Amino acid sequence: MSQSDQELQIAEQKTVLFYDDAVTAVRLADGRVFIPVRPICETLGLDWSAQYRRITNDLVLGDVAMSVAVTTTDIEKGSRRPLTSEMICLPLDYLNGWLFGVNAKRVKDEIRDRLVRYQKECYQVLNEAFQDGRLTTETDVDVEALLAQDSPAAQAYQIAMAVVRMARQQLIMEARLDTAVSTLSEHGERLDQLEAAVGGEHVTEVQAAQISQAVKAVAIAIGKKTKRNEFGGVYGELYRKYGITSYKMLPAKKFEEAMNFLTEWHQNVAGDAPF
C-alpha cells in the first residue's frame, strides 16, 4: 500500500454533513477522493478491529486501501492530540463495496437504520460534495425539479451530462479496443512462434534460392521453344498454385512439394530434371 509523496499529497479536505453526522473526505493531488474508514465505524458503532481485518483481508479493498494523513477538526483547546494523524482510507468509489459488506440484519437494532442510510445515500452525498460543492444533505431547493425544467440552464446541464457520459463510454470503448488489439497481436506472435516451431514459417533463404533456380530453369526451357521471356509466366503459375505473392513467402512445409512441381514441369518441357 506504499505510495509516493506526490500521490499522498492532500489537495483538499472537506467535512460533509450527512444528516446529523460529520463525514471527512480528502482529495489527493492526483484527483482521487479518499474516505477515512475508522470515524465511520465509530459513528455506526462497528468494531474497528474487525472491519480493519475485513478490509485488509479482502483482495480488492486491501489493494486499494491506503494510509492518509488527515487533519483532525474536533481537537479541544489545550489537548495534546496531534493535529494530523494517519488513517486507513478507502477510495470514494469503493466506499459502498465496504459498506454493503456489513450485513444490516446482523447489527444492533439501534444502528440498523443509520447503517442502511449510509449504504443508500452516503456515496452520493460525498460524491456531490466534490463534484458540485454540496456539503450537506439539506437543500432549500428541489434540484431534481430544477433540472427537469425546460430552461436554458437546465438544457445546458443535461447536454453537458450527456457529453460526459458519451466521453466516458468512448474512453471505455477505446480502452477495450486497445486491449483487444494488444491481445490479437500477442496471439499473432504466439501463432508465428508456433508455426516456426512446427515448420509453418516461410522458406529459408537457402530454400528460396533453390526455388528461384528451379523457376529459372523451367522458364529457360520453355523460352527455348516459345522464343519469349517466360519468367513471369512460371512465377505467376507458382504464385497462383500456392496462393502467395513472392517465392520467399512459400510456407516451409510446402518446399518439397513446390520443388517436385517445378521438377515435373521441367521434365515435361525438356525431358530431364537438372535440379
Image (spheres, grey):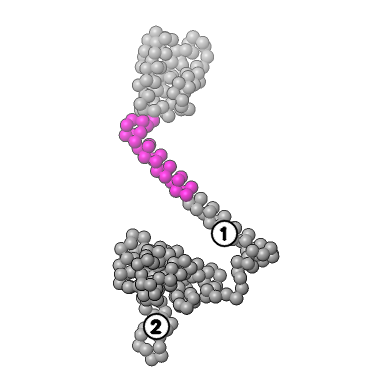
In this rendered view, identify the residue nearer to me: 78 or 112.
112
Q: Which residues are magenta?
A: 176-203
Secondary structure under badge 2? loop
CA distance separating discs 2 and 1:
39 Å
**x and y percentages locating residue 240 in the rendered image:** 48, 22
With 235 as the anchor, is 149 left or right in this view?
A: right
Residue 7 can be seen in this image: no
Residue 114 can be seen in this image: yes
**x and y percentages locating residue 260 in the rendered image:** 37, 17
**x and y percentages locating residue 28 in the rendered image:** 45, 70
Mark 2 vs 1, N-terminal side = 2
Work out which quarter of the rendered image holds the C terminus and state it.
Answer: top left
Q: Is residue 55 magenta?
A: no
**x and y percentages locating residue 184 in the rendered image:** 43, 42
Secondary structure under badge 1? helix
Report the residue at 43% width, 82% height from top.
73
| Residue 209 numbered tag | none
What is the crowding at mark 2: few (fewer than 14 residues within 10 Å), some, or many (at least 20)?
Answer: few
Report the residue at 66% width, 62% height from top.
155
Quadrant in the rendering for residue 23: bottom left
- Are discs 2 and 1 less than 8 Å apart at CB? no
**In this picture, is 76 found above or below 20?**
below
Please, what is the three-letter code of the amino acid marked with disc 2?
Answer: Leu
What is the crowding at mark 1: few (fewer than 14 residues within 10 Å), some, or many (at least 20)?
Answer: few
Task: Look at mark 2 in the image and give the residue it sits on.
Answer: 83
Quadrant in the rendering for residue 35: bottom left
Please, what is the three-letter code of the amino acid marked with disc 1?
Answer: Val
Task: Look at mark 1 in the image and give the residue it sits on.
Answer: 164
Report the residue at 45% width, 64% height from top.
93
